[in-house]
Image (cartoon, grey):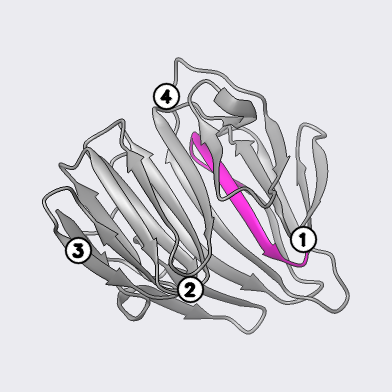
Amino acid sequence: MIICRTAEQCGQADYGWLQARYTFSFGHYFDPELLGFASLRVLNQEVLKPGSAFQPRTYPQVDILNILLQGEAEYRDSNGGHIRAKAGDVLLLAAQPAVSYSEHSISDTTPLTRLQLWFNACPSRENSALQRLALCDTKVKLLASPEGENSSLQLRQQVWVHHLQLDEGEQHTFTLNGNRAYFQVIHGAMEAMTPQENAAMLQCGDGAFIQQEKQLTIRAKAPLRALLIDLVA
């Protein structure tokens, strides 16, 4: 089963220094039926003006995955952790409730544009406090996984996050680990198909809930960049 969630259906925010689109309930945007999906708690698409910042704040016990699409960022935590990142980098912050974190858009001219995902962390699992990898031109790249396989970032949860870059007409078939997945189009257009020939068309900014499927085929209708989030827990 594929259930689409278009960009227009998402929550919206415009604070001047920050523009955001929320897939699930977040901040002022609340929908009691959209509090997350399995262990995926947050999926935000955000743009921060040059020089703007999220001041130090604490988070629940979650893994925060930031995919930087444009600009530069600096992250600090109250334990002394510090890292800078730029477009093309993927960062994973293993948030701890007693630690505060800040984020700054450090370019003088270019907005910081990113996707941010939160996953509920299993309290019995540990990973590094701050991890980073650089995206490459690979058609399909595993960004994060429970064991850090294939040089991916290591999550504290049974989740696999894949990044796709397909040319028009190309396709890729995923075999899913769990019975639920979420698909997010970053840019381009695509068709998602199940083995039962259920199909859905998605455009830039659209997402889709995938339920009770073991395989999913993605066909690019235009040059495509997207995420597939495979959720066991």
Cα separation, mark 3 vs mark 1, equals: 40 Å
Sequence-wise, the earlier of marks 4 and 3 is 4
Sequence-wise, the earlier of marks 3 and 1 is 1
Task: Give the residue displayed 49% in from the left and 39% down from the top.
Answer: 60
Cα separation, mark 4 vs mark 3, equals: 33 Å
In the image, residue 141 above or below residue 127: below
Q: Position of residue 219 (x, y in %)?
A: 37, 62
The circle on residue 104 is 1
Sequence-wise, the earlier of marks 1 and 4 is 1
Q: Amino acid at mark 2?
A: Gly
Cα separation, mark 2 vs mark 3, equals: 17 Å
Badge 2 vs badge 3, beta-carbon distance below 8 Å: no
SS for callout 2: loop
In the image, residue 62 above or below residue 188: above
Q: Amino acid at mark 1?
A: His
Q: Amino acid at mark 3?
A: Ala
